[in-house]
Amino acid sequence: MLAVAVLAAGKGTRMKSQLPKVLHELGSRSLVQLALDSVADLGPDRQLVIVGYGGEQVKAALGDQAELEFVEQAQQLGTGHAIQQLLPVLDGFEGDLLVLNGDVPLLRPSTLETLLTTHRQNNNAATVLTAQMADPTGYGRVFCTDQGILTEIIEHRDCTPAQRQNPRINAGVYCFNWSKLAAILPHLKADNDQQEYYLTDVVKDLSPVMAVDVVDAAEIQGINNRQQLAAAYDALQDRIKTDWMAAGVTLIQPDSITIDPTVTLAPDVVIEPQSHLRGNTTIATGCRIGPGSLVENSTLAENVSVLFSVVSDSAIAANTRVGPYAHLRGAANIGAGCRVGNFVEVKKSTIGDGTNVAHLAYLGDATLGNRVNVGAGTITANYDGQKKHPTTIGDRTKTGANSVLVAPVNVGEGVTVAAGSIVTKDVPDGALVVARAKQTVIPDWQPKPAAD
Ligand code: UD1
Ligand code: CA
């Protein structure tokens, strides 16, 4: 049996934030969520999140995951005190407890698997994830015998200058034999510089305890302040981009590109400079994103291009070209082989295949058929000041430049809307609608001389 506990009760004073530290984000995912993501592959039987400072906020942020059990640590008296709160919850639990710090978000699943395997194969009382750090400042130092048995962990602030020379640090990730841990947990003392109950103190009273060095020290960087948050973001980005390039994605000037961990890309996607892919975004093969685009919570089918544009909460079918300077948002559903071009905004609208909206248009709450041509400057006037209203435009209809379709209104199939029209009533299939003042020409007009 495997239980996982994530320590997420601390305030994170050094973040200087209203938000609990573990709810700060790296690429649209909170730190605590990333910690939980890293254990998913191990298939834990129980998942406990220890909450305290901002507990309601943390619970709300993770609330939709029924498999999580929240354990309250009302006062934050240290990491050992946090794990003491599990004593009643895991009473009688037989198995191992994997402890993660909620502020260590970059662990690879394979690292945790190695930790657990080492722990179980050696029948350890505890196994601690460690790393050799070029700059170990701030971390607890891990001391081992020549035989590789871990004897003690001392917090940076409690170390002598000589002890601080030890580059081996505690990652804040541990495997414990739960019943052995549970037997000594009640006896922790707070005799240290911070007068806190340290989880790290238990290693002195357990045996055997082993250390497992992580291969890539970037994985275990903890986040205590905004600089470390930024450094972890860079490390995560490096990893994500390396993985996507290995999977056949072209990134042009990767340093100028950001990709959230939740994004999925197919081989032969090309991402151009200054482009940002966020949230639950999926991009199919042959797409070309950027330069200068933001795609967020959106699905793009094959061979779509998005040039200098923003696409959020939307779907685009194959071979459609978006941009330059388009804004698709709030459930814009664009068909295949369309053009949505220069200075066009599309909101909560469905557009059929082969339809062009090439210049200076706004489509909101609209449904367009196939092969419609939306002329430059066409606007669906969907808002009457109180409510939004729908517009429908049938297949093959053409709207002239600068036409306004005042919703609710239905324009049929094969309609021609004359330029400059303000359409307020439904138009049947095949009609020409002209809804503008007739041009008046007065010949030989002599302007009146200006009065002085
Ligand atoms: C801890 C370790 C240190 C290790 C480092 C790795 C201890 C005593 N020290 O130090 O050896 O090198 O992590 O990043 O464990 N928390 C609670 N309740 C509390 C206190 C903290 O839930 O009462 C949570 C925090 O929200 C955080 C985690 O525990 O997610 C770690 O706490 P933090 O204060 O950041 O510990 P460090 O000083 O970083
Ligand atoms: Ca920390």
Image: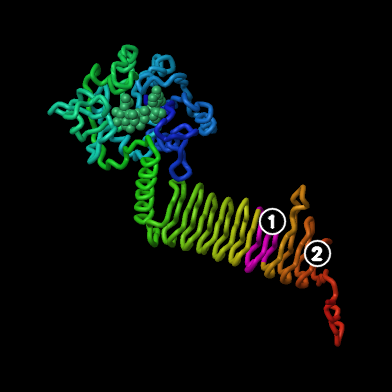
**Residue 21 sits in which quadrant?**
top left
In the image, is residue 134 above or below residue 89? below
Q: Could you tell me residue 355's position as x and y percent?
A: 65, 66
Ligand 1 within 8 Å of disc 1? The answer is no
Q: Where residue 339 sits in the image (x, y, percent)?
A: 60, 67
| Magenta-drawn segment | 348-370
Q: Which mark is residue 423?
A: 2
Q: Position of residue 297 (x, y in %)?
A: 54, 49
Name the image quarter holding residue 434.
Answer: bottom right
Disc 1 is placed on an element classified as strand
Type of the residue with mark 1:
Gly
Q: Which amino acid does the dot numbered 2 rest on?
A: Val
Q: Is residue 360 magenta?
A: yes
From the viewer's perspective, is residue 395 above or below residue 154? below
CA–CA distance in space, label 2 to label 1: 15 Å
Quadrant of the snapshot with the C terminus: bottom right
- Which residue is farthest front? 452
Which color scheme does this rendered protein use?
Answer: rainbow
Front residue of this view, candidates 12 and 400? 12
Identified at 52% across, 34% down, the residue is 61
Left or right: residue 367 versus residue 408 is left
Q: Sequence order check: which comes first, mark 2 or mark 1?
A: 1
Residue 285: image x %, image y %? 46, 60
**Residue tagged 1:** 364
Badge number at residue 313: none
Residue under the image location 39 percent in, 62 percent down: 252
**Which element type, helix, strand or loop, lies under badge 2?**
strand
In-front residue for pair 64/59: 59
